[in-house]
Amino acid sequence: MPFRRIVVGTDGSDTAAVAVAQTVGLAERLDAEVVVVTAYGKGEGGDDTPLAVANGLLRDVRRLHPSARIETIAREGKDPAEVIVGAAAETSADLVVVGNRGMTGRRVLGGIPDRVSHHAPCSVLVADTAWAAILPSDEDPHARREVGSLLVATDGSPTAEVAVDTGVGLAEALGAEVVLLFVGEREHGEKVLGRTRERIGERSGVRPVVVAGDPPSRVLEVAAAEAVDLIVVGSKGMRGMRRVFLGGVPNHVTHHADRSVLVVKTS
């Protein structure tokens, strides 16, 4: 399994706490280490976060998750996104987790999560934290949510196949089912998915699906129809889209998905 060290940021907010809880739950199932990082100093709004406060936030994380393998890091910096990305590079992280509401409660992939997603040196999990805001008052918003199914989008290109390998490997580790999706002409799609399944070998719980239409929109529509918990895409996009980090399909999916999205670093 490629994810052995996972970085997640916190500022003590409820949305950040949800992201940390999801990260810890994932790490425990993958036998991975969690690195929780927080920034101190001048923040985006000009407010000071003293080192003592930052260390207090990290102590709270360890107290809430006593059984997890957690390393905590407090770094001085004006830009929390820069601190998180720097920590990921310093610790040789395989994955960075950010909440899709942002650490300031903003809408999907605004501010900090957007910048982390574009500049992280590794794969990025944009974790769905919006659900916690609408839970009944008697339910714990920090409870861990399991991944029981995921969708992996591919066009058969080498970069997309890296995402397939990561997604299928993650599904095996989590005991999750996989929807292997191709968007485009049916005959070609069936050939692509046939080759992909031959390459990854016979695996239970992997179901190929071919649909026509616009790839970014159809990925989201199929994910909703299949009620998957996680969408997996490659960071370089899919054939026919702009081949830049978070361009095309990945960019659209991460900005508009109503569920968690894993953007696999494919270059």
Image: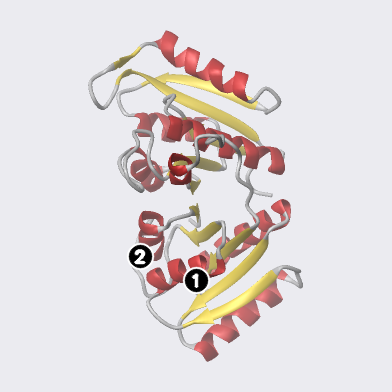
- Residue beneath disc 2: 248
Q: Amino acid at mark 1?
A: Val
Q: Residue at x 67, y 28 (%)?
A: 69
Image height check: is 197 above or below 111? Answer: below
Q: Amino acid at mark 2?
A: Gly
Image height check: is 240 above or below 125? Answer: below
Residue 44 occupies quadrant? top left
- Secondary structure beneath dot 2 equals loop
Q: Nearer the viewer, residue 267 or 64?
A: 64
- Identify the coloring: secondary structure
> From this viewpoint, is residue 4 visible?
no
Image height check: is 251 above or below 23? Answer: below
- Closer to us: mark 2 or mark 1? 1
- Residue beneath disc 1: 222
Q: Position of residue 239 (x, y in %)?
A: 42, 73
Q: Residue at x 56, y 64 (%)?
A: 151
Q: Nearer the viewer, residue 266 or 19?
A: 19
Q: Position of residue 266 (x, y in %)?
A: 50, 57
Q: Residue at x 49, y 71 (%)?
A: 222
